[in-house]
């Protein structure tokens, strides 16, 4: 794996840098560094508009094939884009679920009609997506989903509940796992439906988190409908599509996540220099360990992507979620230790937290969502190491 960049790639870097310098100013200046984990409620409307600006300039979905509206850039160029985006203080991408999860899934599994209908609005930033996977009794055990859909005429009618649905209250569409064979169990009889959110029969209830924000929501489906053609990968064939989406989640999108981690680490290093804790040998060691750990995460992500074929990330991908969630959890504790007593003081009333306080609180959930540590270790043991189930 060659981690150096060619002259052409460095020219691409200059193009990215110029766009960000020219556009992250004026009304968008205040967005710099905002909208990351634990800070999703910041400048929502402005970040939606920022996504449209990026779409008009051709900077959304750059890794998608050109025939689907992307730029078809190389892995190195995706790395460069994420590096420059962080350096410029680019805000959290509110359209990332459509760009990094639903879009690649449709490119891989969708019909031509579905691609024509749904991909262009993601590229332009005009339509936002959320993910309807988890349920109260089906989180890490996703095969236990109970939400049902039945075909009535030309429409699927959906009944059930989803939980931990990120950005649901701002989304136009949701990709929903439903049980479409009433006699099925576990992985069988599940379909992957594309469902419009603005309709009768859908109730969205935000879930307030420790940060005071409510990125997540419960979504109740009571007779919600979607057209019969809005099923991806075939009726009752949704499990393989759902697993494909999760593979994309472990794919190129992790580079953007690590870019956010790097931004947070730089804030902590700056704080340690300013308050003198950088002179504490234990803090210095922990900062060095955090930097080294983040480099390892980056190189592992690049290794995974360099061998990726389709939606299969192989054995290397199995360790990704476990590694970054533990890194970020430990980093959150480091951030509070660097801030010291200041970490206990809110920036304002009634509960206005700074970015590092929000990162710390949000990081408590990292080892739970998108697959708990316990589930990830079972996956590594069984699928990567070939050990027997217990």
Image: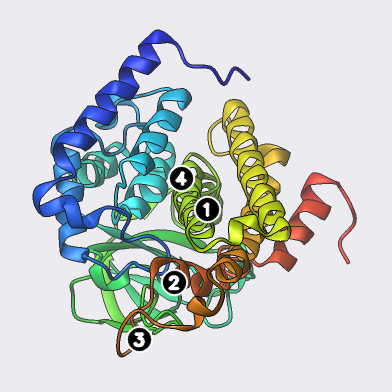
Mark 2, secondary structure of its residue? helix
Q: Which residue is mark 2?
A: 358
Outermost residue on the bottom side: it is: 350
Do residues under tags 3 and 2 come within 8 Å of each other at their CB atoms? no
Nearer to the camera, 252 or 292: 292
Q: Name the residue rendered at 54%, 64% in the picture.
A: 189
Residue 253 drawn above or below residue 151: above
Mark 4, secondary structure of its residue? helix
Quarter placement of the N terminus? top right
Q: Which residue is mark 3?
A: 351
Q: Which residue is mark 1?
A: 269
Q: Which of pointers 1 and 4 indicates the residue nearer the eye? A: 1
10 Å neighbourhood of mark 1: few (<14), some, or many (≥20)?
A: some
Do residues under tags 1 and 4 come within 8 Å of each other at their CB atoms? no
Precedes in sequence: disc 3 or disc 2: 3
172 vs 283, left or right, is: left
Q: Position of residue 362 (x, y in %)?
A: 50, 71
- Measured in 3D between alpha carbons, the distance from the residue under mark 2 to the one under mark 1, in whole angstroms, is 17 Å
10 Å neighbourhood of mark 4: few (<14), some, or many (≥20)?
A: many
Q: Which residue is mark 4?
A: 259
- Measured in 3D between alpha carbons, the distance from the residue under mark 3 to the one under mark 1, in whole angstroms, is 25 Å
Q: Quadrant of residue 348?
A: bottom left
Viewer can see residue 168: yes
Q: Position of residue 244 (x, y in %)?
A: 53, 47
Precedes in sequence: disc 3 or disc 1: 1
10 Å neighbourhood of mark 3: few (<14), some, or many (≥20)?
A: few
Q: Which of pointers 3 and 1 indicates the residue nearer the eye? A: 1
Quarter placement of the C terminus? bottom right
Q: Name the residue rendered at 27%, 30% in the picture.
A: 17
- Measured in 3D between alpha carbons, the distance from the residue under mark 3 to the one under mark 2, in whole angstroms, is 11 Å
Nearer to the camera, 73 or 287: 287
126 vs 256, left or right, is: left
């Amino acid at each position: 794996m060659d981690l150096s960049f060619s002259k052409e790639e460095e020219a691409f870097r200059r193009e990215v840098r110029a766009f960000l310098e020219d556009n992250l100013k004026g009304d968008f200046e205040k967005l710099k560094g905002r909208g990351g984990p634990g800070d999703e409620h910041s400048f929502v409307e402005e970040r939606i508009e920022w996504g449209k600006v990026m779409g008009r300039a051709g900077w959304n979905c750059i890794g998608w094939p050109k025939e689907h509206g992307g730029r078809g850039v190389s892995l190195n160029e995706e790395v460069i884009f994420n590096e420059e985006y962080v350096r410029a203080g680019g805000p959290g991408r509110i359209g990332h679920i459509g760009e990094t999860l639903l879009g690649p899934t449709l490119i891989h599994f969708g019909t031509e009609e579905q691609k024509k209908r749904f991909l262009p609005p993601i590229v332009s930033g005009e339509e936002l997506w959320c993910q309807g996977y988890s349920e109260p009794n089906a989180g890490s055990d996703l095969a236990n989903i109970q939400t049902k859909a039945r075909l009535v005429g030309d429409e699927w009618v959906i009944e059930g509940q989803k939980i931990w649905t990120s950005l649901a209250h701002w989304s136009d569409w949701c990709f929903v796992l439903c049980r479409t064979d009433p006699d099925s169990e576990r992985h069988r009889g599940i379909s992957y439906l594309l469902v419009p959110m603005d309709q009768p029969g859908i109730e969205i209830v935000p879930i307030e988190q420790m940060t005071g924000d409510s990125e997540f929501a419960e979504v109740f489906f009571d007779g919600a409908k979607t057209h019969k053609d809005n099923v991806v990968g075939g009726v009752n064939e949704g499990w393989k599509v759902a697993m494909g989406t999760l593979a994309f989640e472990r794919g190129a999108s992790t580079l953007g996540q690590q870019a956010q981690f790097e931004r947070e680490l730089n804030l902590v290093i700056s704080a340690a220099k300013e308050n003198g804790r950088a002179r504490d040998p234990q803090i210095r060691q922990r900062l060095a360990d955090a930097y080294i750990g983040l480099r390892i995460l980056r190189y592992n992500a690049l290794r995974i992507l360099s061998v990726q074929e389709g939606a299969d990330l192989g054995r290397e991908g199995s360790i990704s979620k476990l590694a970054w969630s533990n890194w970020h959890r430990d980093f959150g504790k480091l951030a509070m230790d660097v801030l010291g007593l200041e970490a206990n003081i809110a920036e304002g009333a009634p509960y206005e937290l700074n970015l590092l306080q929000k990162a710390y609180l949000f990081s408590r959930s990292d080892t739970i969502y998108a697959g708990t540590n316990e589930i990830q270790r079972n996956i590594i043991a069984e699928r990567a190491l070939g050990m027997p189930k217990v």
